[in-house]
Image (cartoon, helix red, strand yellow):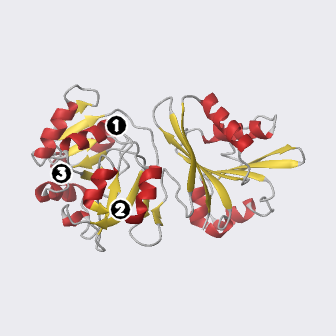
Amino acid sequence: MEIIKSNDKDVITKSIEVLKNGGTLIYPTETAYGIGVDATNSEAVTKVLNFKKRPQGKAISIAVSNTTMASKYVDIGDSSYFFDQFLPGPITLVCKSKKRVDSRLESEKGTLGIRIPDYPLILEIIKSFGKPITATSANTANAKTPYSISDILENLSPSKKKLIDLIIDGGTLPKNPTSTVVDVSGNKANVFRQGSISIFKNQQKILDKISNSPSETIQIAKEFIQKNSDSKLFLLNGSLGAGKTHFVKGIAEGLGINETVVSPSYSYVNEYEFNDKKLIHVDAWRIESKFDLATLFSQNIWDSFVAIEWPSVIWDLEPRLLRDKKAYLIDIVYKNFKQRRIIISKAILE
């Protein structure tokens, strides 16, 4: 097993050599560390299955460099919208497989998950390799999500370590949620797992911008709310520290609120009054039960402007509270220490 820094001049060459020889590669992504092998090499796929202890019939996704490569392995069909709107990014699209990878990576229904990681080094490795690699987290069953090399190695037995040929050390990754998993193989898109990106029916992306600082995030939100008023509901998705509260500060400034906006992490809800109206700021991270939700929504809040951080918590516990409402979806993706990718879409929550 060799460990190489992600900025090493030989990292791409060594990675391709390992993949061509049927070896295993641990690599960083925008979500967590993954384990990759040539998805068309049965012997290599067996190594991943032994590493993960995957039960038979449980699918493993593949990573490709772009939509053109994806179309060689899955039937994109009417799902091109999702590829165009959300990839590269922390989302896995489940499509009908064209049976060109090891069949054990597919589901029992003949579908295959596709990832295009928002991580330039990995995209370059896959592009240069010319074939897809497996895209599953580099941890064994029930072990912690790997955000660092130590997360991986400290939880592996000696026999598991022997299955690894090369590790690309990209440092400690931001603790972003795992990828959103959406099945687009049928007539209707179904969200299997809500992760870093929020996906709803009739979703239309209207802004995709890089913020280089908290003040820039605030300014983006301020300008947005001043130009867009189709909905008063804002659903903010992103990892801890991504900048969700800064975005709400921008909403408040755009509405003319002079009070200092602070995170409602411990109070659940903060309210700010302006011009006989209200901005209600909700943090659902610590909500654990439907009882908590009943208390939170005991009053009719929908006549106010409402900004909800971690809306997936509410959606998972009691989707009827948000169903049929028009909303702006704000996905804030951690790019690096300074940069955030801000994606704003509007949708009807169904």
The three-letter amino acid code for the residue at tag 1 is: Pro
Q: Split into 4 quadrants, where in the image is the C terminus?
A: bottom right
Tag shown at residue 2? none
Q: Label 2 neighbourhood size at 10 Å, few (<14), some (14-19), many (20+)?
A: many
Question: From what the image shows, is residue 325 above or below residue 120?
Answer: below
Report whether 47 appears left or right of 284.
left
Choose between 28 and 225: the one closer to the eye.
Answer: 225
Quadrant of the rendered image containing residue 106: bottom left
Choose between 344 and 193: the one closer to the eye.
Answer: 344
The three-letter amino acid code for the residue at tag 3 is: Asp
Secondary structure category for the residue under label 1: helix
Report whether 163 appears left or right of 135.
left
Q: Label 3 neighbourhood size at 10 Å, few (<14), some (14-19), many (20+)?
A: many
Question: From what the image shows, is residue 228 above or below residue 321?
Answer: above
Q: Give the mark nearest the N terminus, 1 or 3.
A: 3
Tag shown at residue 38? 3
Q: Give the mark nearest the N terminus, 1 or 2.
A: 2
Tell me the residue that label 2 is attached to.
Answer: 76
Secondary structure category for the residue under label 3: loop
Q: CA distance from mark 2 to mark 3?
A: 21 Å
Question: From what the image shows, is residue 337 above or below residue 16?
Answer: above
Number of marks drawn = 3
Report whether 86 appears left or right of 293.
left
Q: Position of residue 84 (x, y in %)?
A: 44, 51
Q: Residue furthest right?
A: 276
Tell me the residue that label 1 is attached to.
Answer: 120
Q: Are marks 1 and 3 in contact (CB under 8 Å)?
A: no
